[in-house]
Amino acid sequence: MKALNRKLLRELWQLKSQMISIALVVATGIMTVVTMRGSYESLVIAQQDYYQQTRFADVWVSLRRAPETLRQQISNLPGVALAETRIGFMATLDLEGLDAPAIGRFISLPENSRPVLNDIQIRQGRYIEPGAPDEVIISEKFAAARGLRPGDGVRAIINGRARELDIVGIAISPEHIYAMPPGSLMPEDSRYGILWMGERALGPAYDMEGAFNEAFVKLSPDADSLAVIDGLNTLLQPYGGFGAYTRRDQPSHMILQGELDQNRVMGTAIPGVFLGVAVFLLHLVLSRLISTQRGEIAVLKAFGYRNIEVGLHFLMFALAAVFLGIVLGGLGGAWLGRAYIGIYQMYFDLPGLQFSMNWQLVLIASSVSLLGACTGAMNAVLKAVRLPPAEAMRPEPPASFKPGLMERIGIARLLPSAGRMILRNVERKALQSFLSSLGVAFSVAILVIGFFMFDGVRFLMDLQFREIQREDVSVNFHQHQSDRVLHELWRLPGVTRVEPFRTVPARLSNGHLYRDSGIQGMQADGKLRRVVSSNILTYPLPADGLVLSRVLAQRLDVNAGDWLHVQMLEGQRQQHPVQVTGVVDDFMGVSAYMDIQALHQLSGEHGLISGVYLSVTQDERSRLYQTLKQMPMVAGVASPAEMLVSFDTQMAQNIFISVGFLVGFASVIAVGVIYNGARIALSERGRELASLRVMGFHRREVAILLLGEQALITLFAIPMGWVIGYSMAWLVVQGMATDMFRIPYVLNPQTWLYSALITMAAALASGIAVRRRLDHFDLISVLKTRE
Amino acid sequence: MDASAEVILRAEKLCKIYSMGDIVVNALKDVDLELHRGELLVLLGASGSGKSTLLNILGGLDVPSTGRLLYAGKDLTKASDHELTVYRREHVGFVFQFYNLVSSLTARENVALVTDIARNPMKPEDALALVGLSARIDHFPSQLSGGEQQRVAIARAIAKRPDILLCDEPTGALDAKTGKLVLSVLNEVNRETGTTTAIITHNAAIGAIGDTVLRMSSGEIVERYTNNTRADVDSVEW
């Protein structure tokens, strides 16, 4: 081995902790790229494959009832390539070991063939036999959550009649990748399942023989989806069509797509930040590291090494750290990506979902890191190489200090020597100090964003389940019921309050802009369900007019006071101009609220209700559930409190892992800057500090001089990090806003505190590590050697 | 110098052995030495003769392998790191060949660095006046010449009124003219403040200005003599 290479290896070994801390920053950058961008791509591939295999529909429509013969007319619409019809409805399930009624979404299957569109994939068991009236296929997540297998039975209350169904198969479907029960915010697999039955078995149960109430189509390649929607709406209007919608509004797809969109934003932004910070750190640390080797560079040149040889030699330090980082980041990314996809597999039923290592991503991220490292190192190497060897070998002239800002404003005299030394060092290298601070600020910012996500979601859940949804139980009916049933409901066990609601599908238009949305009619003086804005103020429902979600108002380009054209999409399909009386900042879904009486007036159908919100005494809840299970009109029962518990459980599982990663990533950055900063300062100022020790300064006093600068950099970084974090959180809020939900721009005081404390702890740990080096300083050898 | 003056520092059979891998280096061999209060000692020797090792041990920067070092009767060879720090802090002043000034502090502040932690220091201004630098008091090291930097270093070393002033090649990095200036400063400080001073140099001519002269070679003191009268610095030529 050549002497120069031997030197390289030995010095790499000597600098191992610095090299590792730099490598870790690079590794983190590459890891986030591989993990986040990689899982985004894996999700997209899995989604596209799955949709293609199962022939996922493009346009969807629900209706009251239409004869099967209409299917041909749908197929004949211009732009429609394939059409499929079926029967679908909700029913309660009576499950062992579960008090509350579970909800089953029943969907019919053709008995002699597979569905043309939205096919299911059998995971266990088999497809249904023609003419077997009690055979059912159930969804995989539901089966897993309830421990059900082919051969087991399940009891359903279909149209008021209890039926024992035989499970023959377990399947998944592209329509239910994310299976959320009505009124819920997340999958609840133990109380919501999809049940597929033969159409001849299911039809009679709901008076749907030879008829359908759901249709969907696949568009031909050149089709205009809006024209097809118009065609479908016109065709189905006499049959109670609720308005066709594209795949974009299909609930499961909307959630998956929302998640993918968020993932794309985060999967670009977060790795971008890390890679940026990594490149910046490489630049900062390597250039300083190489500056300290000035003497050695001169000696090598004096021996006759060529500039290119010397330059490459020192560049190898940068390359070694980056290569180590690339290997660690690649391995870490592959591992973390798998774990990340594992979390998606818990919520999303995507059969082909597997983390695929994208080497191209690794290559791009690696090239960016290498480039950053090389430019950082190159500057310093060139500077050192240009110096004539004799000059470089002489002791470096004292660093140039001049009376600065401190002297001019006169605070220099007020400070002890140590304070002056620290401040002057920072002042002399203002840009370098600022950049170091900026590096540490990113560590703070990453923590702020991470914790902000928890703050936002926590705020959202509290708002939703403690301020907006205050009912103990909400009950949805199959079809609109007369409000006379309210008397019956009041008499149910434990019920202390009943508030009816009505949902009417409607098209809201402003000029050429329109949105199909349910209008939610509620009691204006309701206590159980209220319209609450982001500042937790209850928004009173006026006697007339609509209150819109801010998102909906923006989509329709209206403000409070403007008028909308409203067309009901059911019943008598009345059309009216309606004034927007309020716009509310909410975070869940896209809503239009109205006083229930005003909605009755608008629809021309008085006394109809879609469901009720109930207040129930705790001890009677079980009995109430038993009774509700037996009521034919009940399609579903939900309990916000149970949703909150289930949410909290999931959150608690994930929070430690997420916080762990956040803290880890932030620490890597903080340590990368502070540890390296202090180590380099130690080698730059070793003689100075050793002289002080010789003069009788205690270790602690010398440590303060060395680490005070890093402490100052850290302290300055914290407010800067808060500002960056706060701004980036705003970008995240904007980037992640979907129709399904928006993250509230809320940051708890703890977020500020923890982000500062964690960064300070990482800086302190770095300081302690360097302090230990300082304590073991060989005073004599430092004084003998010239730099 | 009064030969009966109190012995302030006594070295008894000091040995220092470094092992560098398989090679054992005897840097000091049975060195006996007495330093009297107010004495100006010149320690001559070529590089590698062991004079820096001796000075480091005398200054509490290093400990001998065997032998004893007694400061005012206290055995420093058994002192802890903390005790050695206190010894240096309170009793010893150092002047280095390469000055070792703190580049971020002005001349006055470099001196204040020591006076801040000393028990009975001079004012930094007075110390700098002693070395003739009153006019450059607020300059940073980068604004001072080599000789000026070394005089700041001397002012820094004497400002705490040390009992012992140890100077390691104080003229080594300076031209002859500036070197003489620095030596005369050390000479004056010794005369006026009565600070016990030890100067290490490889320059034999400088021996003439000391009370006592020791010459070292291969870790041993090979010659030891006293000057009846100390020569004037200006008369020394090299």
Image (cartoon, coloured by chain):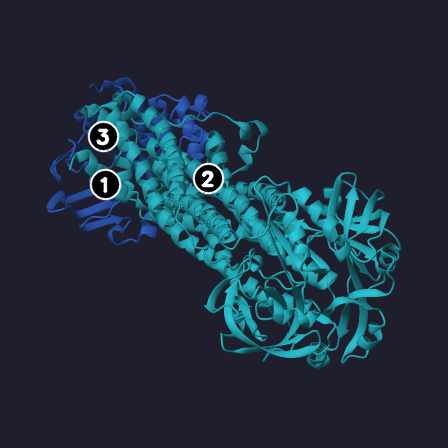
Chain colours: A cyan, B blue
The quarter of the picture where residue A557 lies is top right
Q: Is residue A461 left or right of residue A42?
A: right
Instruction: Identify which residue is drawn at 43% across, 40% down.
Output: A278
Residue closest to the eye, A232 or A242:
A232
Under mark 1, the amino acid is: Leu
On screen, residue A691 above or below A601: above
Looking at the image, residue A87 lies above or below residue B27: below
Q: Quadrant of the N terminus of chain A?
A: top left
Q: Does label 1 lie on the same chain as label 2?
A: yes
The residue pinned by badge 1 equals A9
Task: Return the residue at label 3.
Answer: B210
Residues tagged 3 and 2 counted as in contact (Cβ below 8 A): no
Q: Which residue is mark 2?
A: A277
Give the chain of mark 1: A
- Of marks 2 and 1, which one's residue comes earlier in the chain? 1
Q: Quadrant of the C terminus of chain A?
A: top left
The span from disc 2 to disc 1 (Cα, nearest Å) is 27 Å
* Amino acid, disc 3: Gly
Q: Nearer the viewer, residue A493 or A753?
A: A493
> In front: mark 2 or mark 1?
2
